[in-house]
Image: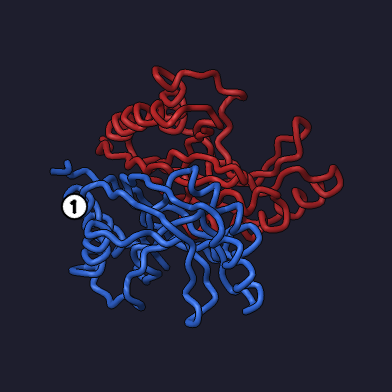
Chain colours: A red, B blue
Amino acid sequence: MKFGIILFPSKKLQDLVNSYRKRYDPHYALIAPHITLKTVFEATEDEVKEIAQDLRRIAKNAERIKISIQKFSSFSPVNNTIYLKVEPTDKLSELHAILHKGALESQPEFSFVPHITVGQKLSDDEHSDVLGSLKMLDTKHEETIDRFHLLYQLENGSWTVYETFLLEKESN
Amino acid sequence: MKFGIILFPSKKLQDLVNSYRKRYDPHYALIAPHITLKTVFEATEDEVKEIAQDLRRIAKNAERIKISIQKFSSFSPVNNTIYLKVEPTDKLSELHAILHKGALESQPEFSFVPHITVGQKLSDDEHSDVLGSLKMLDTKHEETIDRFHLLYQLENGSWTVYETFLLEKESN
């Protein structure tokens, strides 16, 4: 089975992002707006039980994460994905790092650029039009996220939550 | 915000059900195949924190649930929803009952008929054609479910998981 680990932002932010994804993201119906912490990896149903135990331990020892969004950006010229940039923080990087160690060891495909995808697989013209309009909007937003989720992918490409993990460590 | 409480069956069963839902269920893209334990209810973001605490306690004291599926059925003539019937068990009924008591008090809209929707909003002709073909299939299936999920609905109608609750009581 295919798994992934993500943060869901607040409903308010998901609703905002979906208003763009509806038009610009072909994955709109497959998963809610999210910040990917660990991209798709393979595990059996037995392996995932151990992984979930690890994730419970990790979550207990991790603090809630404040995210700050300042602007829309794009992965162009690598690809035409447009996203809301989540400002990098130590807590985000630490959580990302620990999810690629131990039983979860894997090399991240790319360096970690925390983001919420807004559009992808756009033509070059559409990409520059859409990005141009989005950059004119006021997108400043802050919120605190207190949980992450382990998801699995169904055969139709959609993602279901396997388990939620609450970030339980008290902040100093 | 709108919330609901559901069981997700195994990936295998979800994939099977989705192969029909794709054609027959207009809610196909909004939520993965599921067994509803508590239909949509309203709660604020503060209220849901208390509800989640209740659900953690409930889950700790509830055993895993073995489900058995024997056949396709339909809510006709009430409506044209076709579903996989989940055989009623005491554990399912107890979990359903406790999710309608205390802080979660509400009158269920209908008597509890555990099921996984396969098709809905079908015309009368389509309903009888589809149900007729499905009834000829062998659908016997058993599995054990060890968790339930609290979901919230986004403005576009799709559902996201708020939290997972593991059924942790050891069976006798």
B3 to the left or right of B88 = right
Which quarter of the figure has residue B111?
A: bottom left
Nearest to the observer: residue B5 or residue B134:
B134
Residue drawn 59% across the image and 59% down it: B21
Nearest to the observer: residue A118 or residue B106:
B106
Position of residue B105 measured from the top left corner of the image (x, y, whole percent): 23, 72
Position of residue B96 measured from the top left corner of the image (x, y, whole percent): 27, 64
Residue drawn 36% across the image and 60% down it: B5
Nearest to the observer: residue B115 or residue A121:
B115
Position of residue B27 measured from the top left corner of the image (x, y, whole percent): 57, 64
A88 versus B78 height, above or below: above
Q: Please, which residue is most extreme toward the right here?
A: A125
Count neighbours of disc 1 (C-alpha within 10 A) and say few if under 14, some if 14 to 19, many if 20 or more.
few
Nearest to the observer: residue A121 or residue A128:
A121
Position of residue B116 measured from the top left corner of the image (x, y, whole percent): 45, 60
| Residue that label 1 marks | B57
How many labels, in total? 1
Residue drawn 76% across the image and 39% down it: A80
A30 to the left or right of A97 = right
A143 versus B36 height, above or below: above
Q: Please, which residue is most extreme toward the bottom here?
A: B77
In which quadrant of the rendered image does the C terminus of chain A lie?
top left
B130 to the left or right of A96 = right
Q: Secondary structure at mark 1?
A: helix
Q: Amino acid at mark 1?
A: Arg
Q: Which chain does the numbered disc 1 sit on? A: B
A141 to the left or right of A164 = right
Residue drawn 40% across the image and 19% down it: A103
